Amino acid sequence: MPRLETPIGRDGPIIEVRIWIGPEHEEALKLRGYQTPRPLSVSGLVDTGAQMTAIQQVLAQGMGLPVHDWVGLRSSVLGAEARDAPIYLMRMTFDGRKRRLTMSY
């Protein structure tokens, strides 16, 4: 299995994340003769307790990702009540290399 080792800085375990459109969206764009957006490289925070991956809506909108569905989220950042958040179908790689994710504090 690939391995990712990265130091944990003051802001937590930050790694490079590449995101791009899902295969269904890519195929639909190609069939219509449109170019597909290139993958974006952004900094990402590893949260081993998260149940799903989140990206900023501005990134999804900038890539032209269509909203696939909506989900109610509860988070210490968002406050006590659940808020609706969009779900996007996308692909993602971590740190640009195939390595296992291991971290130590």
Image: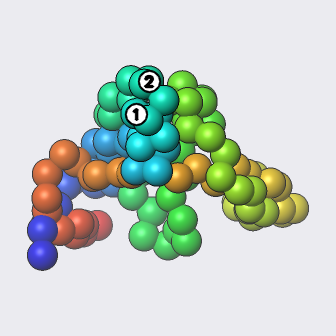
- Measure the C-alpha gap from mark 2 to mark 1: 5 Å
Q: Residue at x 54, y 25 (%)?
A: 62
Q: Is residue 103 left or right of residue 47?
A: left
Residue under circle 2? 34
The secondary element bearing badge 2 is classed as: loop
Amino acid on which the number 2 mark rests in the picture: Tyr
Is residue 57 shown above or below 45? above
**In what quadrant of the picture does the N terminus appear?**
bottom left
What is the crowding at mark 1: few (fewer than 14 residues within 10 Å), some, or many (at least 20)?
A: few
Decide if residue 76 is on the left or right side of residue 50. right
Mark 1 = which residue? 30
Position in image of residue 67 (x %, y %): 67, 45
Badge 1 amino acid: Lys
Q: Residues within 10 Å of mark 2 (few under 14, many from 20)?
A: few
Residue at position x 27%, y 52% in the image: 94
Q: Residue furthest right?
A: 81
In the picture as drawn, the residue positioned furthest to the bottom comes out as 1
- Quadrant of the image containing the C terminus: bottom left
